Amino acid sequence: MAERGCPGAAPWGRAGAGGRAVAGAASEGPLERGRCRYLRTGRAWCQMVEVLLAVLVLVCSSVSGGSAGGYTGLPALGGIYYYHYGGAYSGFSGADGERAQQLDQRFHLLKLPIARAAMAVAGCLLVFPCILILVGVLQVPWRFPVWLLIECALDIVIAVGTVPALYYFFHSMVGVYNSSVCKEREQLYQSKGYQGFRCSVHGAEVAVGLLGCMATVAYLLSAVLAVRGYRTVRQKKQKPVRL
């Protein structure tokens, strides 16, 4: 009776009826052998794209809330510069300098909870596909095909949940930029000739939105591939054993 092989697993060069090893097994690369071959499947590639997108969202959201902003950001080197060395930032002195620092800190505190929430979501989205990749490498879907349906459901939930999450992110950010703190901060910097502190969504935050949309598409595609994988596994398991 012929032994049924696991889908996605390459031959290991086991001896046949005549004692001869399967030809070509010794020349296979590391991605052709056993469990590692899962990494060549469409589902695995889609999950690796999800990991990459989650990392980029994590980086962009950390940039959005990672510093106090303005010339007091970058561990206060700006403040040291214009308070002690003058030069380009010498327009801020005395009460104006202290007010600019206070507004920078308050503006940072307004954005910080939103940025932390985005980072937490990105962290979860980073862990989830990593777990799926590990599950695929361990060939759990072959032993328990129902897992693929569970994976499909989770992918759909994440894809659908990303839409309100992005709405909340941008709605909260717009609220921060429309606050009196941001408006006063913008006017103070503009009065000194600095134009880079407008109350509008910045590039890193726009990138979070674009990457989130791409992640939604990736998870929907992953759900489709999970359903196809479930059908493939069921068909191979239902094939009669050849004598």
Image (cartoon, rainbow, N blue to C red):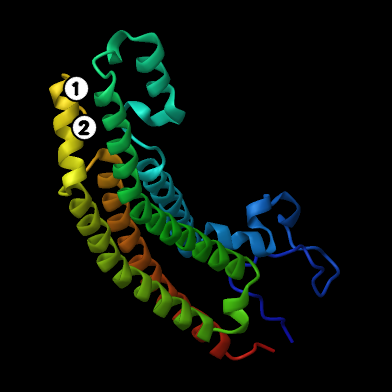
> Left or right of 119: which side holds 180?
left
Q: Residue 209 placed where, x, y %?
A: 27, 52
- Give the left or right position of residue 168, taking residue 49 as reference: left
Residue placed furthest toward the front: 95
Q: Identify which residue is drawn at 16% across, 38% down.
A: 184
The three-letter code of the residue at mark 2 reads: Phe
Seen at 20% across and 58% down, the residue is: 171
Q: Is residue 131 above or below residue 191?
A: below
Residue 57 at what x, y percent from top left? 39, 50
Name the image quarter holding residue 183.
top left
Numbered disc 2: secondary structure: loop
Few, some or many C-alpha atoms within 10 Å of disc 1 (few <14, some 14-19, many ≥20)? Answer: some
What amino acid is found at the position of numbered circle 1 in the picture? Answer: Tyr
Q: Is residue 105 left or right of residue 24?
A: left
Residue 75 to residue 5: above or below: above
Q: Position of residue 238 (x, y in %)?
A: 54, 90
Most distant residue in the right direction: 19
| 25 relative position to 163: left or right | right
Placement of 201 over or under 16, stated as above or below: above
Labelled pair 1, 2 in contact (Cβ < 8 Å) = yes
Seen from the viewer's position, the closer of residues 191 and 66 is 191
Q: Mark 1 = which residue?
A: 194
Does residue 36 appear in the picture of this structure?
Answer: yes
Q: Position of residue 49 (x, y in %)?
A: 43, 54
Residue under the point 38% across and 56% down: 118
- Which quadrant is home to the N terminus? bottom right
Residue 205 against residue 72 in the figure, above or below:
below
Q: Nearer the viewer, residue 224 or 14?
A: 224
Q: Which residue has dot 2 on it? A: 197
